[in-house]
Amino acid sequence: MGNGDEYLKIDYGYYRYIPEKDILEGVLDVHRVIFGTADGLKEKMQNKPHLLFNVAFEGYKVIGYKIGYELTNEKFYSWIGGVHPDYRHLGVASMLMKIQHRYLKESGYKSVQTKTLNKWRSMLILNIKSGFDITETYTDRYGKLKIVLEKELSKEEIR
């Protein structure tokens, strides 16, 4: 992290497509730090309809991201994201979510859905604090319990 957290300047951007190489590599680097690998992620992105990337930067360095795509013309799926461990507890994930939801509401989506695992407690808590409801749980093909959450964007204030 930069010298003196009190002077840390974080900028946010969004892309309605797979971003340029430097930004995409930054997203993949953060993904690798969090999840251990980014194998196949780029290929999976190419098959998603109406992608939206929300990215957090310190200077030119990607420090966090949130990627989602359209499920229907009214429902958006917030697919994957994270914040580099060195930049956690600064509100980056919360701001990425707020920016994503504002964009979705302005674009006419009525709801946003996400899925998580019980082990990602901080994400589960952030989703619930941000107005998501748990709508179902199921066990995936690997035997892991998945938690499905949804939020009606009509509840979202645009600021």
Image: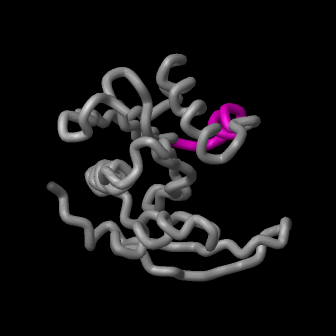
Q: Horizontal and vertical percent for residue 144?
A: 77, 71
Q: In the depicted view, which residue is nearer to us: 131 or 8?
A: 8
Q: Is residue 80 magenta?
A: no
Question: Residue furthest toward the front?
Answer: 4
Q: In the depicted view, which residue is nearer to us: 61 or 52?
A: 61
Determine whether, in the image, residue 120 is placed left or right of residue 23.
Answer: right
Examine the rendering and report whether any part of residue 123 can be seen: yes
User: Where is residue 37, by image quadrant?
Assistant: top right
Determine whether, in the image, residue 55 is placed left or right of residue 50.
Answer: left
Q: Quadrant of the N terminus?
A: top left
| Badge count | 0
Q: Horizontal and vertical percent for residue 139?
A: 77, 76
Q: Horizontal and vertical percent for residue 86?
A: 44, 42
Examine the rendering and report whether any part of residue 107 can be seen: no
The secondary structure making up most of the magenta span is helix
Determine whether, in the image, residue 114 is placed left or right of residue 57.
Answer: right
Q: Residue at x 84, y 66 (%)?
A: 142
User: Where is residue 13, by image quadrant?
Assistant: top left
Q: Is residue 86 above or below residue 93?
A: above
Q: Residue at x 60, y 82 (%)?
A: 136
Residue numbers of the magenta segment:
41-50
Q: Is residue 104 above or below residue 74?
A: above
Q: Is residue 76 above or below residue 134?
A: above
